Amino acid sequence: MSVIVIENLTKRYGQRVGIQDLNLCVPEGVIYGFLGPNGAGKSTTIRLLLALLRPSGGRARIFGRDCWRHGHVIKADLGYVPGDLRLHSWMTARRALDLFGRVRRRDLRAYADVLLARFELDPEVKVRRMSRGMRQKLGLILALAHRPRLLVLDEPTSGLDPLMQDQLYAHLRERAADGATVFFSSHTLSEVEGLCDRVAVVREGKLVADERLDDLRKKAAREVTLRWRHPQSADQQPPEFLTVRERRGLEWRCTLTGPVMDLTRWAATQPLEDIAIVPPDLETFFRQFYQQDTLEP
Amino acid sequence: MNRGLLERSVREVATVTLLCGLGAMVFEMLVAYAIRTFQEQLDQMAGQWLQLDWVQNMFKGLVGSEIGEQFGAGALNSLAWVHPVLLTLLWAHEITICTRVPAGEVDRGTVDVLLGLPASRWSIYVCETMVWLAAGALVLALGLVGNRAMTWLLPSDLGYDYHQAIVVVANLYCLYLAVGGLALLVSALSDRRGRAVATAFGIVVASFLLNFLAQFSTPIRNISFLSLLNYYRPLLILRDGGWPSGDMLVLLITGAVLWLAGGLIFNRRDICTV
């Protein structure tokens, strides 16, 4: 069953296109990475899911309900952390949790205490006295405290130190193991690489990839470093499956654009001193994604 | 009604409401004190000044009706409810409150968290409305208490008709509703609180000036029905008694239409904080 279904979703701001004909399905119980550079349309998509924006075309559904028309019903089982989190300065974590509990008509205290301890947040400090990281923790706790079936997180680790990021990742994995779905937006791949089961990539308001991370890895080109024995050998032309990006003395830094077997067969016949085949570098791969219209493996 | 949302709104407006309420109370006490203490001097001064047409017109613009030759008790008491200080206090209070959602929340960026909660935009709007109505009633009640307290402390031959004072405050509350409806509509159309406050206040001040200047110019008088102040005439109530039901109805309908338009716009508009 898909928790989020987006069909031909379009949002225009006057002449400018926010997103164009976006199609997406997020299955239940997965951690779904939503990647794209700044201004790609990630936040617009999330704001459409949260019914903050009204679609110009197409539609988005969560739990089978239309996001715009039934937004308030959907949000009973949804936790949201906005990209630019702002909270009222007079709130403390305790006060905010009490208030949110009343709005949600649920007693959040027991589980909130667990989260406060896990994220090491003092519940009595006012927001105006909190650091950015503390405010982010509070935002996360407020989004998690009612144990929603769907978490929509827009760049949730900004302001968190690496230890807290690990805590968050661990918590999200636990929630996913319990059957919750996580929609995790980010502009850095390294963040979602170890966390997400599947990723979608948007660029200029359009979806350019929606695949499992393993499948994307297979498409990513390997980095190859060759070290020649003689300077004469280093001057030769490379084979067609190898693109030389840099020649430095006896060393070639290349991108493998063909099968590994072709490379190993060719390398066996060459006067090489050393060869290193590095696993696919997804970061480079995603940079290409951000820069090109389509992926060319 | 969502208790959590109500509590949140009350917390947000409590300080400004208390300050404005106390301000209204103190101001009403001061005016009542001044009227009672300097009653004779005021009568003499008014007797001389009211010979002049433009002074007559100015007072008419303020209190909403002809004063006539006699500057009587009704005119003196009505000054307490039309003084620009009181009106400014009241309007500043409600414009502050009514531009909180959505303009203020969008401006501060807190609207994302608010609209991430399981509450419809209508329920948020209704909660804000309830708090605005209650806060206005409190501010006016405190003003009335101040006025009444001083008349009790300093009895005079001016007399004090409690029933009539309540009718004036009820009429003023209708004006409060109309101005608040306007502020809610402006807020629903805006993403910046400063702009919403300036627009609402600008319209209200223009309305005040229109009503005031109508006494001096016939062309302006022809369009003075557009001014909200045209439907608030405390001197008539204090002098003649009775309920100004027509004026109150116009203000109530205006407020309701503006409120409804604000709600519809807020319910359908895009919310962008970036």
Image (spheres, rainbow, N blue to C red):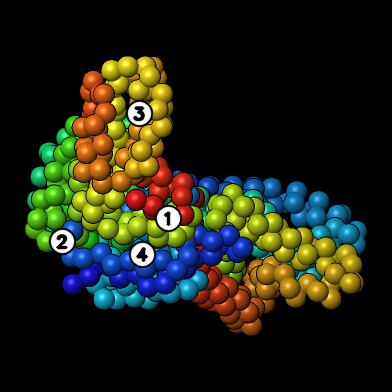
Q: Quadrant of the N terminus of chain B?
A: bottom left
Q: State if disc 4 and disc 3 touch (CB < 8 Å).
A: no
Secondary element under disc 2, as helix, strand or loop, is loop
Residue topped by disc 2: A29
Image depth: mark 1 or mark 4 in front: 1
- Of the two numbered discs 1 and 2 on the same chain, state the one appearing first in sequence: 2
Secondary element under disc 1, as helix, strand or loop, is loop
- Of the two numbered discs 2 and 3 on the same chain, state the one appearing first in sequence: 2
Which kind of residue does numbered mark 1 sit on?
A: Thr
The residue at 36%/63% (across/down) is A50
**Numbered disc 4: what chain?**
A
**Numbered disc 3: what chain?**
A
Residue topped by disc 4: A49
The disc label shown at residue A294, or none: 1
Q: Position of residue B176 (x, y in %)?
A: 56, 65
**Numbered disc 1: what chain?**
A
Q: CA distance from mark 2 to mark 3?
A: 41 Å
Q: Position of residue B193 (x, y in %)?
A: 55, 52
Which kind of residue does numbered mark 4 sit on?
A: Leu
Quarter occupied by residue B170: bottom right
The disc label shown at residue B57, or none: none
Which kind of residue does numbered mark 3 sit on?
A: Arg
Q: Nearest the camera: B6 or A222?
A: A222
Q: Report whether residue B51 is seen.
A: no
- Of the two numbered discs 3 and 4 on the same chain, state the one appearing first in sequence: 4
Q: CA distance from mark 3 to mark 4?
A: 44 Å
Q: CA distance from mark 1 to mark 4?
A: 26 Å
In the picture, measured across the screen, residue A14 lies left or right of residue A202, that is right
The disc label shown at residue A253, or none: 3
In the picture, measured across the screen, residue A246 lies left or right of residue A176, that is right
Image depth: mark 3 or mark 4 in front: 3
Q: State if disc 3 and disc 2 touch (CB < 8 Å).
A: no
